[in-house]
Image (cartoon, rainbow, N blue to C red):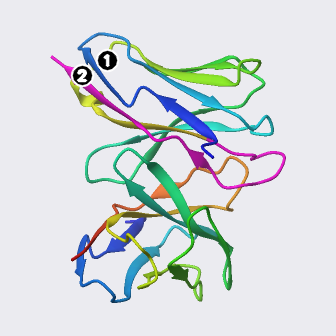
């Protein structure tokens, strides 16, 4: 049973474009939603995170949009650059209500071409 | 220079042999985690430990074993009972092991079973 479904599997955008990666979750008890970025041959690193009491969070060029009723959240990368080419993972956990480990989506491989 | 180290970076073993992957952190984090990463499968949790001398099974613990005798170290043994051990293995740590603590990942070990 996949608790966090991520799409698309891969994405190619032109430099300056706005790639959007979507995630959907099933467990309504999840209350913490981070995104991790992974470059080839490296471990993932936290990019940005959101709680369900807000609908949007921005950090630099990265924005998370959150729709609690639809149980969906997405990552938008503004003015994408070739250096943003990486694999992105969404995740979820019961951080505030149950202190459970993160559950990760399957990842999206993003390629930003000049 | 604080961080998480995993060794070796590449590991080759014959089928039927047990193999131990090393993970060390000098971040003074209480919690440590092991994930397995396969192409298109995302990160799947094998085991995690929130305190010395205690650990819990993750989603895919069968065929793996761990120990947590020291705060800094969380070695993973891939046993001969693991049916398909070839994968990229990631170790992570976080301050307390819950709530919204960021997980910091090591560089990974790529295990190939011949």
Residue A61, image x, y percentages: 43, 19
Residue at 69% across / 45% down in the picture? A93
Residue A24 drawn at (x, y percent)? 61, 28
Q: Is residue A109 above or below residue B47?
A: above
Q: Where is residue A44 shown, x and y percent of the image?
A: 41, 48
How far apart in space, not on screen, are marks 1 and 2 (Cα)?
7 Å
Residue occupying image coordinates x 61% and y 23%: A73
Where does residue A10 sit, x and y in percent of width and height? Answer: 33, 28
Quadrant housing residue A99: bottom right
Q: Is residue B68 left or right of residue B26?
A: right
Q: Label 2 lies in what chain?
A: A
The structure residue drawn at horizontal position 57% and vertical position 71%, both measured from the top left corner, is B61
- The residues colored magenta run A92-114
For the C terminus of chain A, the image quarter is top left
**Disc marking residue B87:** none
Q: Are marks 1 and 2 in contact (CB under 8 Å)?
A: yes
**Mark 2 residue element:** strand
Among the 4 quarters of the image, the one containing residue A96: top right
Front-lying residue, B25 or A19:
A19
Q: Is residue B20 visible?
A: yes
Residue A1 on the magenta span: no
Chain designation of label 1: A
Residue A80, disc: 1
The residue mark sitting in front, 1 or 2, is: 2
Main SS of residues in magenta: loop
Give the vertical position of A51 relative to B113 (above or below).
Answer: above
**Nearer to me, A3 or B23:** A3
The secondary element bearing badge 1 is classed as loop
Write down the residue under mark 2.
A112
How many numbered discs sit on the rendered protein?
Answer: 2
Within 10 Å of the Cα at label 2, are there few (<14), some (14-19), or many (20+) other Cα atoms?
A: many
């Amino acid at each position: 049973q996949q608790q966090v479904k991520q799409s698309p599997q891969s994405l190619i955008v032109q430099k300056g474009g706005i790639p959007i990666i979507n995630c959907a979750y099933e467990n309504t008890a999840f209350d913490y939603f981070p995104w991790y970025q992974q470059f080839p041959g490296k471990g993932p690193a936290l990019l940005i995170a959101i709680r369900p009491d807000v609908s949007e969070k921005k950090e630099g060029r990265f924005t998370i949009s959150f729709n609690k009723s639809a149980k969906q959240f997405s990552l938008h990368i503004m003015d994408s650059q070739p250096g943003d080419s990486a694999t992105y993972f969404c995740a979820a956990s019961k951080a505030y209500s149950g202190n459970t480990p993160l559950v990760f989506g399957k990842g999206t491989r993003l390629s930003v071409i000049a | 220079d604080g961080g998480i180290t995993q060794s070796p970076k590449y590991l080759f073993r014959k089928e039927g042999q047990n193999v131990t992957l090393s993970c060390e952190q000098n971040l003074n984090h209480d919690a440590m985690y092991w994930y397995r990463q396969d192409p298109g499968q995302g990160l799947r949790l094998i085991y995690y430990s929130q305190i010395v001398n205690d650990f819990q099974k993750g989603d895919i613990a069968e065929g793996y074993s761990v120990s947590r005798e020291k705060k800094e170290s969380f070695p993973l043994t891939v046993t001969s009972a693991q049916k398909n051990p070839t994968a990229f293995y990631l170790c992570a740590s976080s301050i307390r092991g819950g709530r919204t603590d960021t997980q910091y990942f090591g560089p990974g070990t790529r295990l190939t079973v011949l």
